[in-house]
Amino acid sequence: MPILYTNDLFILALGLATHLVFVIGLLLTRREPRKDHSLAISAFLGLVLVMALGDLTEVMYGIGEWTLPGPNHVVAVMTPLLLLEGPALYFYARALSSKDPLSFNRKDLWHLAPYAAMQFLTILLYAKSQPVALHGPSLHDLGTTLSTPLPPERLITMLVYLPVMTLYVAMSIRELGRHERQKLDYFSNLEGSSLRWLHWNIPLMGLSWGINLVLLGDNLLFNQLNPSPMVSVLIFAAWIYPLTFMALWQQPIYAPARRSPAAEAEMDAGVVLKVPREVLQVSEEAPAVALTEARYQRSALDGERMKRIAGKIERAMAEDKLYRNHALNLRNLSDHLKVSENYLSQVLNDYIGSNFYEYVNHWRVREACELLTNTTNRIIDIGEDVGFNARSTFNAAFRKEMGQTPSDYRTAAMRETAEKKSALLRFPATDGPG
């Protein structure tokens, strides 16, 4: 019976590992405008898979005769890979919440520092603890089961893992919170831009890791709970399946930039380059250096320039009716006006006094009021015509702007029109004094 139970555990663990391989393959091969978020979550799932394979190897030792030395040593020294899960999760959150594709620079190498230090320490301690015999110890001799003490290098890794993972969970949640704030300055419709599923899944992952650490500590120190090995696998499945399905469903939120209108924005916004006196007095031997330095010393937008850009935004809405585009975002408006996104955000927030989402919806509601009053079109059709892509969104935006639902507004408008007609019938207008 124990062997049958262990075989069931092995089959469940193998199924989870196979699922991860399948999901990673789909993420890496699917076509999408941006791949940075898929690469980041694939790296995270790959690390989880490697650690899961280590646990799977332990099960194989428990149910069979696998005593080859190679896998023993690999499993023993790969525990520090746990310290890369946090950075991979953080980069996934950053890739989803960033307007531009994620790029790595030298500063990002610091995220590898905990892993590199712990990997070096693990290999050093493990090498010193090994006998000279070529066959090496068995996996259970290395203390990798919960029933025996962990070797010092693995115990240190587990102790370091908890604060490191807590830090990266907090950093990931901060990135998601930043996205929730900035999306109002970028999108005119918020459907498909929410990352609340990840915001809730990250604490679920942290909770599962915490439970497993408690179980590990109890087996090492107190041995009071005595959970079956199936518990850890089920806890793992409880968060890995929702995460992988949502990662496959999630598409890039921000489309990659087609071109940068920065140079045209400087002309349209009337940006003046403030050239320092030292640059003006530069010798003729270095004109290119002087020009480069001058280019990056720009003044901020003043009131007159903000007024000019605000006028261009107003005309784009009033004359071009860009708000009717369901997928309108700040980048579309930037391309249309040849004004940089940063300038547009600054004008909207500081000069007009509204974020992009509220500003566009104001124009949509404004036209919707006219259509509700002067036409008999269905309310849902009116919402779609002015740019809303869902009736619930239309109702919410209309209620916020007008203090009542579109249906109530139309009823009130019809009543007012009827009263005016009735008044004209009772008191008809005359051509002159009578």
Image (cartoon, rainbow, N blue to C red):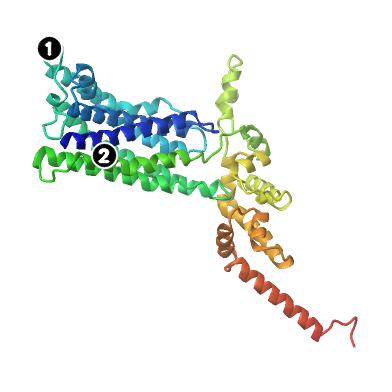
How many numbered circles are shown? Answer: 2
195 and 164: which is toward the camera: 195
Q: Which residue is mark 2?
A: 233
Q: Residue at x 33, y 41 (%)?
A: 169
| Residue 407 percent coordinates (x, y) | 62, 68
Q: Is residue 218 left or right of residue 172?
A: left
Mark 2: amino acid: Val
Q: Let me know if residue 159 appears in the view.
A: no
Q: Is residue 236 above or below residue 318?
A: above
Q: Quadrant of residue 109?
A: top left
Q: Which residue is mark 1?
A: 133
Q: Quadrant of residue 11?
A: top left
Q: Residue at x 12, y 12 (%)?
A: 133
Q: Is residue 246 left or right of residue 336?
A: left
Q: Residue at x 37, y 34 (%)?
A: 19
Mark 1: give few (<14), some (14-19) or many (20+) Cα within 10 Å.
few
Query: Which numbered marker is on residue 165?
Result: none
| Residue 190 percent coordinates (x, y) | 53, 50
Q: Earlier in the sequence, mark 1 or mark 2?
A: 1
Mark 2: give few (<14), some (14-19) or many (20+) Cα within 10 Å.
some
